[in-house]
Amino acid sequence: MAMPPYNPFAADCSLRYVLITGASMGIGALFAREFAKRGRNLVLVARSADAMHMLAEELRRSCGIRVEVFPADLRDPGSPERILEFCHLRHTEVDLLINCAGLSRAGDFSDIPEEKLDEIVMVNMLTLAKLTRLFLPDMVQRKQGAIMNIASLAGFQGVPGLGLYSATKSFIITLSEALHAELKKSGISVTAVCPGFTDTAIFEHSGHNRTQIRLPVCKPEVVVEAAIKGLMKNRMLVYPTLLDRFLVYSQRVASRGMAIGLAGFFAGIRSDR
């Protein structure tokens, strides 16, 4: 028999922790603020130690919660094990893991430097998978917990100009779908959040000129609100806006080639589109 949906704001969760990667900025920082406002203790993970410590101090002061900070470069293959060890040493029971960190690179696949390719695959896929694998056993033993993975609409088809990024997001979606089914009777929720273009610093960091995008750019607050609602309803996939849902379901009537061509057109990266 299936367990009831995970509720991250239930009374018995109040002493446990929400672990958020990519927590120093953008969607990750917004998740931290939202869960802090609702009384949840946090473990913040990102490269920027100064930004995380500032955020942690703000949330401790304004929300009266406990916040642990662990600066980590998720491009390092050993970072997941060090994060788990840190949590064990601090006696922080994590019942919600939010894999929010991600990298991208705009442009043709053949132009991506080899080291950047390795970094994107490591952060978007391998580190996410290892963190999930490392933190799941304790959740399964308690029969309570959740994994939230931040994917993208780009994961539903290849996107010319964002080929590697879209491939890694496809990995996140399919892994989340499989885990959602595997764990549905264990009390563990697994959700993949699939937003379209969202107003974060990823554009600047990836070299993607946002002025060329031919779709509305979503506010990150909308993504976070929809993600939390979807988690509480044990949704396997969450589409933050009606446009996101429409774009996914429209692929049912479009040919695969048309879907890929339109994705490249909307992204507006390649000059020949």
Image (tube, rainbow, N blue to C red):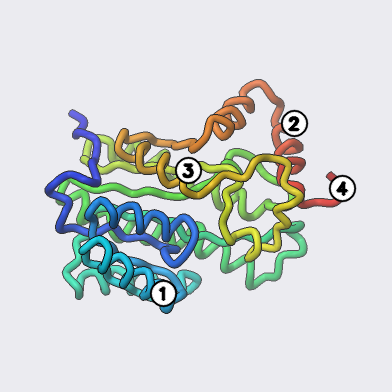
User: Between marks 4 and 2, how big is the CA–CA gap?
Assistant: 16 Å
Q: What residue do we see at 61% from left, 23% from top?
A: 252
Q: Residues within 10 Å of mark 4 (few under 14, many from 20)?
A: few
Q: Which residue is mark 2?
A: 258
Numbered disc in front, either 4 or 2? 4
Considering only order in the chain, which callout, 2 or 4, is on the residue closer to the N terminus? 2
Considering only order in the chain, which callout, 3 or 1, is on the residue closer to the N terminus? 1
| Residue 272: assigned label | 4
Residue 171 seen: no
Query: What kind of element bears circle 1?
Result: loop
Residue 185 in picture, x, y percent from top left: 23, 35
User: Residue 220 versus residue 92: which sits nearer the camera?
Assistant: 220
Q: Amino acid at mark 3?
A: Val
Q: Residues within 10 Å of mark 2 (few under 14, many from 20)?
A: few
- Which quarter of the figure has residue 55? bottom left
Q: Residues within 10 Å of mark 1 (few under 14, many from 20)?
A: many
Q: Are marks 3 and 4 in contact (CB under 8 Å)?
A: no
Query: What kind of element bears circle 3?
Result: helix
Residue 107 seen: yes
Image quadrant occupied by the N terminus: top left
Considering only order in the chain, which callout, 4 or 1, is on the residue closer to the N terminus? 1
Residue 215 in picture, x, y percent from top left: 68, 40
Q: Amino acid at mark 2?
A: Met
Query: What kind of element bears circle 4?
Result: loop
Q: Which residue is mark 1?
A: 72
Q: What residue do we see at 46% from left, 75% from top?
A: 48
Q: Which residue is mark 3?
A: 222
